[in-house]
Image: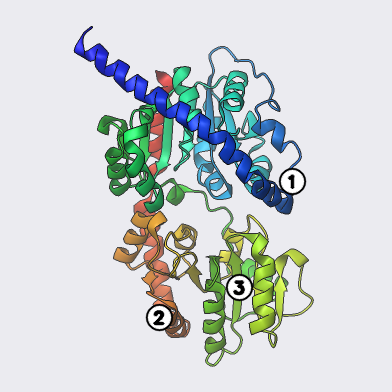
């Protein structure tokens, strides 16, 4: 037996060992987590048909059309669904292509069916990543190219793609600090399995280097930039529309401070800043948009405890009858619209002890001046680019956040200057969509 053949058999043996270990572990772990998952699904609602799709039996046996290439795009949740919109629409316009879109969360599925039913040939929930369910889904949907958004590297999904000779592509590829730590520790086990991935189109050189370090061949990795910067931001409100919406939401016509995708602890910090700000801007308003709408009960407790003297309203309860001091945006899919009503924003999950950060991109694209904390590891390249161009400000802790809000809110010239730099940053950061489509086009032609 030649040395080359021995090498490939050894590599395939390791890949097979990994997938069987994964399969043996998956079932008991899934059973242990099932009660928590079912409770979350019940809280969020809209679970009808979910199980059958996730088991692979609630999908139809989808026959191929001669001359068409079937592209499967997996976008885990609402955020990723919005990120792939421009890519979806470009692929849907391609006469060679049929589009299958899957998502994991109920909010992602609801948004996908609402926005993309007219351009996607099929929309389903992503199957549970267990051999019989994934195999059944693949067998019925017959995809030719599989695209995963960001970090959707499910081992069984990857295995089924390789078994069928289907190229798998990671678009907007990134590895968070946590994912990278785990991947590096276990790379000896699944390094060979990563070869199921045909291409990684990484957000930045930093992310590309991380993929190389965990074992992906360098020739399969390229940097295409961040698709989130190339999203169609939708309707941009003029001054009249903005004023109408503010009045309808009870925000009056004064200064609006936004907490964008906040996490526990950050609402209290913003409430403290808001109370201080009212000393110089009596008509200012606070708008809190938590990352997870189901935290409304926790936020209600905070406001009842710390802001009982203020008029607070939750958007899920309908239009307020009078003007409010604090509006809680506890509805899904409306952050872009609400962001346009803000004069200054803080991006959540970025103050200690949080480390990962929520996206600052929408504020940047809409020209809303913004602050974020030091914990922005999920948006490392964006965070760095914004700071270098002066399109955002970093605050190290809660005290600095309060101080900068009080200073910036009364400095109209500073706010306008940052808004201008954000528009310049957005313009200079575009181009990822074209580079991603160019890479995919070569696969579709293959």
Q: Is residue 354 left or right of residue 78?
A: left
Any part of residue 251 in sight: no
How dense is the environment of label 1, judged by Cα within 10 Å: few (below 14), some, or many (20 and up)? few
Give the spatial CA distance, label 3 vs label 2.
20 Å
Number of the front mark, 3 or 2: 2
Give the spatial CA distance, label 2 vs label 1.
41 Å
Q: Residue 86's spot in the image, x, y percent?
A: 51, 41
Q: At 42% across and 31% down in the image, what residue appears?
A: 169
Sequence order check: which comes first, mark 3 or mark 1?
Answer: 1
Sequence order check: which comes first, mark 2 or mark 1?
Answer: 1
The circle on residue 148 is none
Q: Is residue 14 above or below residue 415?
A: above
**Which residue is outermost to the right?**
321
**Which residue is outermost to the top?**
1
Give SS at disc 3: strand
Kindly indicate whether the residue at mark 1 contacts the one at mark 3 (C-beta within 8 angstroms). no
Give SS at disc 1: loop
Q: Residue 39's spot in the image, x, y percent?
A: 70, 51
Quadrant, the N terminus: top left
How dense is the environment of label 2, judged by Cα within 10 Å: few (below 14), some, or many (20 and up)? few
Number of the front mark, 3 or 1: 1
Determine the image quadrant of residue 441: top left
Q: Work out whether residue 422 or residue 271 is closer to the camera in this orientation and state it.
A: 271
Q: Which residue is mark 3?
A: 287
Determine the image quadrant of residue 123: top right
Q: Work out whether residue 54 or residue 344 is closer to the camera in this orientation and state it.
A: 54
Q: Is residue 74 left or right of residue 11?
A: right
Q: Work out whether residue 290 or residue 295 is closer to the camera in this orientation and state it.
A: 295
The circle on residue 400 is 2
Q: At 67% across and 64% down in the image, what residue appears?
A: 330
Q: Which residue is mark 1?
A: 46
Q: Is residue 299 left or right of residue 130?
A: right
């Amino acid at each position: 037996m030649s040395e080359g053949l021995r090498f490939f058999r050894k590599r395939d043996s390791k890949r097979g060992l990994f997938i069987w270990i994964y399969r043996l572990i998956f079932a008991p772990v899934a059973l242990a987590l099932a009660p928590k998952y079912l409770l979350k699904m019940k809280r969020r609602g809209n679970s009808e048909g979910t199980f059958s799709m996730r088991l692979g039996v609630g999908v139809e046996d989808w026959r191929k059309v001669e001359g068409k290439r079937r592209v499967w795009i997996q976008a885990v949740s609402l955020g990723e669904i919005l990120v792939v919109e421009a890519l979806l629409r470009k692929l849907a316009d391609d006469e060679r292509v049929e589009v299958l879109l899957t998502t994991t969360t109920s909010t992602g599925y609801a948004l996908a069916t609402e926005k993309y039913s007219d351009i996607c040939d099929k929309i389903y929930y992503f199957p549970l990543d267990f051999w019989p369910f994934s195999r059944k889904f693949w067998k019925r949907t017959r995809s030719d190219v599989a695209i995963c958004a960001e970090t959707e590297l499910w081992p069984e999904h990857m295995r089924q793609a390789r078994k069928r000779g289907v190229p798998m592509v990671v678009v907007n590829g990134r590895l968070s600090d946590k994912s990278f730590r785990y991947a590096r520790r276990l790379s000896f086990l699944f390094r060979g399995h990563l070869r199921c991935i045909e291409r990684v189109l990484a957000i930045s050189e930093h992310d590309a280097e991380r993929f190389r370090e965990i074992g992906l061949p360098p020739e399969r990795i390229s940097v295409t930039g961040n698709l989130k910067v190339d999203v169609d931001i939708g309707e941009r409100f003029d001054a009249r529309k903005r004023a109408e919406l503010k009045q309808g939401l009870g925000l009056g016509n004064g200064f609006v401070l936004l907490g964008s995708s906040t996490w526990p602890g950050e609402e209290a910090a913003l409430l403290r800043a808001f109370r201080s700000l009212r000393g110089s801007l009596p008509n200012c308003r606070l708008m809190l948009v938590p990352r997870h709408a189901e935290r409304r009960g926790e936020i209600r407790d905070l406001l009842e405890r710390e802001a009982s003297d203020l008029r607070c309203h939750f958007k899920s309860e309908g239009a307020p009858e009078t003007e409010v001091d604090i509006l809680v945006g506890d509805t899904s899919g409306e952050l872009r619209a609400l962001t346009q009503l803000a004069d200054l924003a803080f991006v959540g999950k970025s103050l200690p002890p949080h480390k990962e950060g929520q996206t600052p991109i929408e504020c940047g694209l809409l020209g809303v001046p913004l602050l974020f904390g030091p914990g922005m590891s999920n948006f490392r390249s964006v965070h760095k680019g914004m700071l270098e161009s002066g399109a955002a400000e970093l605050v190290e802790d809660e005290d600095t956040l309060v101080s900068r809000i009080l200073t910036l809110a009364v400095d109209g010239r500073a706010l306008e200057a940052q808004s201008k730099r954000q528009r310049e940053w957005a313009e200079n950061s575009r181009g990822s969509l074209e580079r991603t489509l160019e890479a995919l086009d070569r696969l579709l032609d293959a």
